Amino acid sequence: MINQVYRLVSPRQFEVTYKDKSIISSDVVVRPTHLSICAADQRYYTGSRGKEAMKKKLPMALVHEGVGEIVFDPQKEFQIGTKVVMVPNTPIEADPYIAENYLRSSKFRSSGYDGFMQDYVFMSRDRLVELPKDLNMEVAAFTELVTIAVHAISRFEKKAHNRRSVFGVWGDGNLGFISCLILKKLYPNSKVIIFGKTDYKLNHFSFVDESIKIDEIPEDLLIDHAIECAGGKGSQYAIDQIIDHIQPEGIISLLGVSEYPIEINTRMVLEKGLTLLGSSRSGTSDFQRTVDIYKKHPEVVDYLSTLVGNVHYISKLREVTEAFESDLSSSWGKTVMKWNI
């Protein structure tokens, strides 16, 4: 069959390409229905990744956050019409010690490998996780982002000591919101504090135990463990504050992406015996745990719905450009594309 793929060929310019795909294989065919735009997509769209990266990666279909419906399964394990979340990480080998999302050989959609902006996506069945039938698909569209927080917390659980009375999360954006929410559901008896700098963003964190502006942190405040979701240059200031307020032998889970090296007070890291734990992307097991959380705590989906920003109905290629341009001016939440092209 001929599949249409909508690729970015240069900054702010998409083109349709055609790929001949065979359905005589073990791949499951998925029709994308809802796609979500992420900051990494925007770096390609605007050309801010730099000339060398753009030259190496493009042309490429964007978007690695998405859900869809099964249209064909050669093994008939999935019923036609089943709603699924698509896992963008695609490992080509297994390692007994290194998770699939950290293997350097793994491919990741919309990062040098075509993403979900296609008419149909052909995927290995182990890259699909079934969704509840009644799930809000606009929320489900950015499940991949939720799995980033779930993955980081899963790694934390394996490495942290068991004093987990107070968690601190630095960063009042989307990932900070999700991290606080998941922590509060997994550790309902623990205190979760959000540290941010923008009042209207902090107002969304109604489920946390306390919200504190980063320039108003009490000197004697102590936390057991922390998640840093600030990113950019803000990562340096966030980590510096965390080191000041975290208890000895705590874990600092790093999630904020910084394009440039940042300074860290290693003297106090050593003195307190701290662990800095980096986490990136996620794997199928994280997607399954996230969907299980949706099922067990349906109120999580309700809270996540406050992150749904603009919803764009896509029936023409120019409407994709409009969605990306609109997302650039959005200061809160996720831009979702309802994929009808």
Image (cartoon, grey):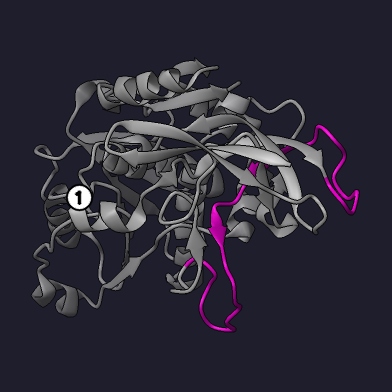
Q: Which residue is mark 1?
A: 221
Query: Where on the picture, by quarter, is residue 137?
Result: top right
Tell me what residue is drawn at x 39 percent, y 35 percent.
208
Q: Position of residue 273 (x, y in %)?
A: 24, 78
User: Is 88 covered by the magenta stretch?
Assistant: yes
Q: Is residue 298 visible?
A: yes
Q: Which residues are magenta?
A: 73-101
Tell me what residue is drawn at x 34 percent, y 68 percent.
277
Q: Is residue 188 visible?
A: no
Q: Is residue 114 left or right of residue 133?
A: left
Asked if residue 151 is positioned above or below residue 194 in the image, the reply reads below
Quadrant of the drawing holding the N terminus = top right
Q: Position of residue 309 (x, y in %)?
A: 41, 20
Which secondary structure, mark 1? loop
Q: Is residue 58 left or right of residue 124?
A: left
Q: Residues within 10 Å of mark 1 (few under 14, many from 20)?
A: few
Q: Amino acid at mark 1?
A: Leu
Q: Nearer the viewer, residue 40 or 265?
A: 40
Tell me what residue is drawn at x 56 percent, y 22 percent.
338
User: Is 256 covered by the magenta stretch?
Assistant: no
Query: Where on the picture, by quarter, is residue 260?
Result: bottom left
Q: Position of residue 170 (x, y in %)?
A: 26, 46
Q: Is residue 249 left or right of residue 313?
A: left
Tag count: 1
Give the farthest residue toward the right: 76
Asked if residue 94 is positioned above or below residue 295 in the image, the reply reads below
Q: Position of residue 58 (x, y in %)?
A: 36, 50
Q: Is residue 38 left or right of residue 336?
A: left
